[in-house]
Image: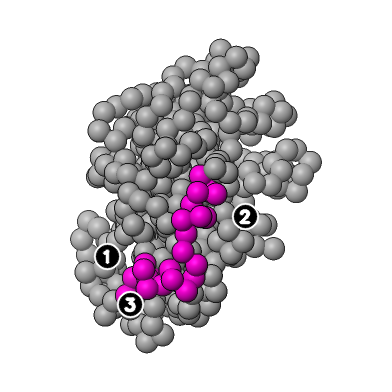
Amino acid sequence: MRSWIAGLPLLLVGLPFAACSSSKSAADAADAAAPDDDSAAPENPGPPCPASGVAKGPLSLAMTRTSVIVRWEACRADATPGLVYRPESGGAADTAIATVAKPFVLKERHTAVLGPQRSPDDVPGTVYMHDAAISGLTPGTCYRYELAADRTIAGRFCTSQPDGGKVHFLAIGDTNPLLGDATSKLLAKVVPMGADFVVHGGDIQYYDSHLETWAGWFPSMQPLLALGAMQPALGNHEHETDDELDDYSLRFFGHPDFGGDTMWYRYESGGIWFHVLDTEEPIEPGTPQGTWLTAGLAEVATKPGFRASILVMHRPLVTCGDNAENDGARKAYASTLAQYKVPFVIQAHIHGYERFEIDGITYVTTGGGGGLIGDMNANISRAECGMRKVSGGFFHAMDVVIDGTGIHATVIDDAGATRDTFTVAMP
């Protein structure tokens, strides 16, 4: 069994696409245009190995109140391991010494066959994963770090807040940065807001758009990865090819000891518990994942300092947009969510924004991270749509602050405009 951790949408002129799904005609056209492996390498090789040996990343994940993991991919076995870090507010520097370099053999080549921006191939070969596990940190503190291999390669991570502390995170979903410039414009507006960590609603990267590869995704998304711990849900685009889930999605964002039995997990900050679900598997009560969720909600509600729980998932429980909803699971969990103080559900998959208020619970669809915007009213006849308060087809991310007065959210679009603000009362 594999663990998911902290564990796209397609602007192709003349080719029709549905939000968050594959288009057969587009895929056939791309396959016809795609070179075979022998010709792909000289036409669009992977990026050259830099002098530092650092090929992808770094990013942080698996944050707790006193620890975090910083991870990056090296393209040489002799790349210098380790990093230097210090409190963001100032103080003495320290060096992470618990660094593991693990060889990983990639066997498949993946090519972005269409424009507008050519993305380097993901190429076969051996890479070396570095995990710097840093412990003994101060709760509720942000740190800056630099890789020893190249001190210009830097980032930031924050530890979880102590009981009652102010929790600040950025929520985003369905990021497709090489579709155009929407993702980069959006990150330029929301990253400076200084959230402590990132809640990603899934569909992190899109092979299916025929526009990008992981080799192209990382440079585009580095501002977000450098902001704080990346805590994603699993989306349907995280395993578009037979090898992607293991070779890329879990290699970058997976870890075996982070609170989940397979690719669902939970984590905490300031007494707020985030329960991240894998909607590519059944989530209903009585399923293995549903049993895990119900038991976990009950368990954390008894912990000292507990304030509330939040659910995070990719496919929505409720939407009026152009895809399916899981209204049966929403109704089946209604009494459980009320019993165990779950006032807020974050979902994605629909390429746009929605906010519902249903039986004291706020459901937000935040799937506007860069994928081609969809039809937010395609299923407006659903009865639940009468409880939708705000919606719109626009690129966006959501800045969320949780303090003693409630959950306060601001929805920002790629021009920096505020599209929605709301407060969810603490249960």
Say what secondary structure mark 3 lies in.
loop
Q: Dot 2 corresponds to which residue?
A: 263
Q: Report whether residue 164 is seen.
A: no
Relative side of 362 to 94, left or right: right
Q: Is residue 40 magenta?
A: yes
Asked if 8 appears above or below 214 in the picture, the reply is above
Splitting the image into 4 quarters, where does residue 127 fall? bottom left
The foreground one among 324 and 401 is 324
Q: Are marks 2 and 1 in contact (CB under 8 Å)?
A: no
Q: Tell me residue 154's x, y (percent).
A: 27, 65
Relative side of 4 to 100, left or right: right
The foreground one among 329 and 23 is 23
Residue 49: assigned label: 3
Q: Which region of the structure is painted magenta?
A: 26-49
Q: Tell me residue 302's x, y (percent).
A: 63, 42
Q: Dot 1 corresponds to which residue?
A: 154
Amino acid marked by disc 2: Met
Q: Is residue 400 magenta?
A: no
Splitting the image into 4 quarters, where does residue 131 fall? bottom left
